[in-house]
Image (spheres, rainbow, N blue to C red):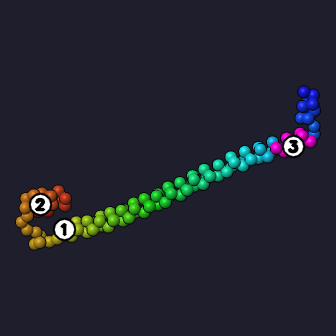
């Protein structure tokens, strides 16, 4: 037992054990950092994909908004044309259509 204790407490053996321990802990730290780097790269790739999908969605919404805006402008122009038409352009209309016209554009028969 004393021989084993003397061997372990030998400065050279302690130095070798310290170096091995440092290398072991360094390796564990390195593998942990490597795993974390791989996970972070995957998260970055996921975030970039989400950003790409977000941009595509925003572009589609902007295009839909522009189409709705153009449609709204055309509808207002058509409504203005109907409202400003002279009475001579008015004629008999099916009662159903006349009812829809009155609800949509207002009073003038």
Q: Using the image, tell me which numbered label, if any, was put on residue 38.
A: none
Among the 4 quarters of the image, the one containing residue 20: top right
Is residue 24 rendered to the left or right of residue 79? right
Which secondary structure lies at badge 1?
Answer: helix
Residue 8, horizontal then vertical, whole percent: 89, 35
**Which is more toward the observer, 8 or 68?**
8
For mark 1, what is the residue? Answer: 82
Magenta region, residue range: 12-20
Which secondary structure lies at badge 3?
Answer: helix
Magenta-span inclusion, residue 14: yes
Q: Image height check: is 54 above or below 71?
A: above
Q: CB under 8 Å between callouts 2 and 3?
A: no
Q: Residue at x 39, y 60 (%)?
A: 61
Mark 3 is surrounded, within 10 Å at the Cα level, by few (under 14), some (14 to 19) or many (20 or more) other residues, namely few
For mark 3, what is the residue? Answer: 16
**Which is more toward the observer, 52 or 22?**
22
For mark 2, what is the residue? Answer: 97
Q: CA distance from mark 2 to mark 3?
A: 99 Å
Q: Residue at x 47, y 60 (%)?
A: 55
Mark 2 is surrounded, within 10 Å at the Cα level, by few (under 14), some (14 to 19) or many (20 or more) other residues, namely few
């Amino acid at each position: 037992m004393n021989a084993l204790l003397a061997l372990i407490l030998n400065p050279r053996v302690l130095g070798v054990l310290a170096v091995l321990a440092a290398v072991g802990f360094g390796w564990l730290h390195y593998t942990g950092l490597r795993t974390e780097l791989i996970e972070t790269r995957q998260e970055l790739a996921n975030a970039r994909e989400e950003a790409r999908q977000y941009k595509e969605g925003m572009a589609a919404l902007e295009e839909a908004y522009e189409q709705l805006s153009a449609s709204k402008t055309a509808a207002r122009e058509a409504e203005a044309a109907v409202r400003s038409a002279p009475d001579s352009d008015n004629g008999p209309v099916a009662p159903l259509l006349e009812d829809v016209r009155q609800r949509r554009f207002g009073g003038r028969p």
